[in-house]
Structures are given as C-alpha cells and as structure tokens.
Image (cartoon, rainbow, N blue to C red):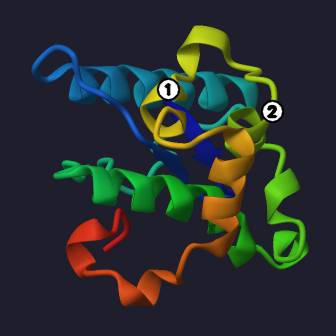
Amino acid sequence: MIRHRMPNHIHLILKEEVEGGISRMMQRTLDGFTRYSNIKYKKSGHIFEGPFKAVHVEDNNQLLYLSTYIHKNPKELLKWQKQWEQYPWSSHQDFIGNNRWGLLLSRDIILKQFKNSKEYAKFVKTSVAKETFDDKLLIDF
C-alpha cells in the first residue's frame, strides 16, 4: 500500500506475500528511482542515505496506529500543520474518499474495521499522540 510521501522520506505499509518480496521490491524501486533522477538531473551517486527501515507489524493495534501515524505525519510540516488532511501525497484522502490508486492501494484491511470511511476519518483525527505508544509501535527510530 502506498501511504505517504514527505519531502525527505516516505512511509509505506506493505503486505509481504512472498518471502523477501518487500526487500527485492524496495531495492528495485529505489535503485530505479536513483538511476532516473541521476539521468534527469545529470548527477551521479546515491540519493538515499542508507537502506530502508522495516518494522514487522505484530498485531492489529500496531497496524491501526501506523495507519494513523502515517496519515497524520504531514502535521510535521509547517505548511500542512492545520490542513494535514489535504496533503496531496498522502493516501488519507484515498481512505476517506475515492481511491486514486486503484489496486495499488488496498484499503480494506483498515477500513473493514470501521462502519464507514467517516468513522475511520474520525478515528485518525482523534487518535492520541505518538508519545503515548511503546517504541515497538514506531516506524521511525
């Protein structure tokens, strides 16, 4: 699932269907993007600082927390603090409205836990701050 793009990082929640599949997909995607950017901007070398970070989602509470954390992450950007729900590179609008990504964004695992998308939007909006969660729930260390 594509979830969110910040200026210097992205957040994804992905379901691995083949062992090692996420690592292979991330390597190919990040390598391809680096090659594309280097050609487009006539540069060479690395774009990303290091390897991607991955956290295994242990349970449903962690999954729901991560979804909320990612969708509220634009609040970290000064320009988007008060209008984080409209951040154009977040999938939040795709969860509460029309899914612009089609099959690339699988919303069901989250949305089926709520009566409707408005209930999910309310859940995200009223969720507690990340400081109240255990470190094991965090995607950023």
User: Is residue 27 placed above or below 52 in the rendered structure?
Assistant: above
User: Is residue 107 placed above or below 64 in the rendered structure?
Assistant: above
Q: Between marks 1 and 2, how big is the CA–CA gap?
A: 13 Å
Which callout, 1 or 2, points at the residue further toward the start of the chain?
A: 2
Q: Position of residue 43 (x, y in %)?
A: 63, 37
Residue at image position (54%, 36%) is 111
Q: Secondary structure at mark 2?
A: loop
Foreground pick, 93 / 7: 93
User: Is residue 141 placed above or below 20 in the rendered structure?
Assistant: below
As drawn, the label of residue 108 is 1
Q: Residue furthest top?
A: 103
Q: Are marks 1 and 2 in contact (CB under 8 Å)?
A: no
Q: Residue furthest left?
A: 19
As drawn, the label of residue 97 is 2
In the drawing, does residue 10 fall left or right of residue 121? left
In the drawing, does residue 136 fall left or right of residue 79? left
Residue at image position (49%, 32%) is 112
Number of residues whose C-alpha sits closer than 10 Å to that of mark 1, classed few (under 14), some (14–19) or many (20 or more): few
